[in-house]
């Protein structure tokens, strides 16, 4: 009898925990866990493991990152895949497996099946393993599809009991990209309150995404990437970077189609100041910064602190553990 009762209690506990885990997934969203500055794992834990891999994303979650960031490209057969460059050469072993196509290795010239034969290689300070960490994916160093990244986020949300955010970037200004992002997110129950930001360097892409979101009645938050521009009168705006040219978009205009800006940090021509961030906040927009790439713990802590003290809301981090430590120290000291 006692054993039956104990089993019932255990079953109830397990179910409750499972439900809690489900609520933590992309679709269920009642808790504001974004009130404190957010650490966004830039291309995964890209300072430690090959960028844009399931292994790198999972390690970032284990390090406490709030969001993982997949940059997205489109394969020849129209599938969204997580990779930064529009070519496969810098981050994979494509050159050792395939001949060039159209004079190179463009993602758009390879089918998903072909891309899946590749292995993603470490770049920069990345390595092929991280001490004490075994990736849970069967193929942790393949180029993931966007859907595989979403599935990892949801699995990790359940496993950790906290909502892991998703921060996809449309790397191509292409309606196919826009439609693919919206379709994948919608199919996975993402909505206006989900822990998600869709980012782009193209204001045209974001304006189009916003129009499509409104038409689909699913307004997920958008972030315009660019540079902090301040005019001679001290008025803040966003510099939209396209090749060598920079187009200025007013904060009022940005606020008409997006929820925030993602700004390049540490660039002398476009300094981010406390006053700049105050003006962006006054326009109703969030301020995120990229890229926090300092590997040295002391220098990194100082860099994070500089921007956190100005009021930055989110930081793209190559070393998510350093970002989380800096954010936690900042919150504790407040
Ligand atoms: O998306 C923010 C930041 O990642 C932009 O730089 O070149 O790493 O995509 P990139
Ligand atoms: Ca990016």
Image (cartoon, helix red, strand yellow):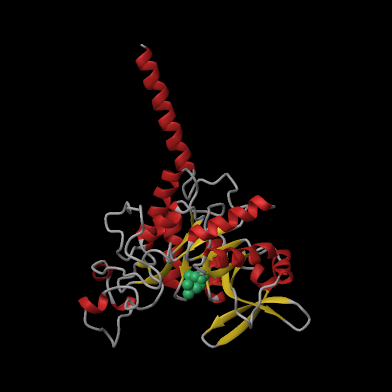
- Would you say residue 138 is visible in this rendering? yes
In-image side of 62 versus 135 (left or right): right
In-image side of 10 versus 243 (left or right): left
Q: Is residue 204 above or below residue 188?
A: below
| Residue 176 % position (x, y) | 41, 71
Q: Is residue 199 above or below residue 88?
A: above
Q: Is residue 122 above or below residue 40?
A: below
Give the residue at x 26% y 69%: 118
Location of residue 39 (image quadrant)? bottom right
Location of residue 145 (image quadrant)? bottom left
Give the residue at x 34% y 73%: 91
Location of residue 237 (image quadrant)? bottom right
| Residue 263 % position (x, y) | 59, 72
In-image side of 174 versus 138 (left or right): right
Q: Nearer the viewer, residue 163 or 194?
A: 163
Give the residue at x 68% y 72%: 251
């Amino acid at each position: 009898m006692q054993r039956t009762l104990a089993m019932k209690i255990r079953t109830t506990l397990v179910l409750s925990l499972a439900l809690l885990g489900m609520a933590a997934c992309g679709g269920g969203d009642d808790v504001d866990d974004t009130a404190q500055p957010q650490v966004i794992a830039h291309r995964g834990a890209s300072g430690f493991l090959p960028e844009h891999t399931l292994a790198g994303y999972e390690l970032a979650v284990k390090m406490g990152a709030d969001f993982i960031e997949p940059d997205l490209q489109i394969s020849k057969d129209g599938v969204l895949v997580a990779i930064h460059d529009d070519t496969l050469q810098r981050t994979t072993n494509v050159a050792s497996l395939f001949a060039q196509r159209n004079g190179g290795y463009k993602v758009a010239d390879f089918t998903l099946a072909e891309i899946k034969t590749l292995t993603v290689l470490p770049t920069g300070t990345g390595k092929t393993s991280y001490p004490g960490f075994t990736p849970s994916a069967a193929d942790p160093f393949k180029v993931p599809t966007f859907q595989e990244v979403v599935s990892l986020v949801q699995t990790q949300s359940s496993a950790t009991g906290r909502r892991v955010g998703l921060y996809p970037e449309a790397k191509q200004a292409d309606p196919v990209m826009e439609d693919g992002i919206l379709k994948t997110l919608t199919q996975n129950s993402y909505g206006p309150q989900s822990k998600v930001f869709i980012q782009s360097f193209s204001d045209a892409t974001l304006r189009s995404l916003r129009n499509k979101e409104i038409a689909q009645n699913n307004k997920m938050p958008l972030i315009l990437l660019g540079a902090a521009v301040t005019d001679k009168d001290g008025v803040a705006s966003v510099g939209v970077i396209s090749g060598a040219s920079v187009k200025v978009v007013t904060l009022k205009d940005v606020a008409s189609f997006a929820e925030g800006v993602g700004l390049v940090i540490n660039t002398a021509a476009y300094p981010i100041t406390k006053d700049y961030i105050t003006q962006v906040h006054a326009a109703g927009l969030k301020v995120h910064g990229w890229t926090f790439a300092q590997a040295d713990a002391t220098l990194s802590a100082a860099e994070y602190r500089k921007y956190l003290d100005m009021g930055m809301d989110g930081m793209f981090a190559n070393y998510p553990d350093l970002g989380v430590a800096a954010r936690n120290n900042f919150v504790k000291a407040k």
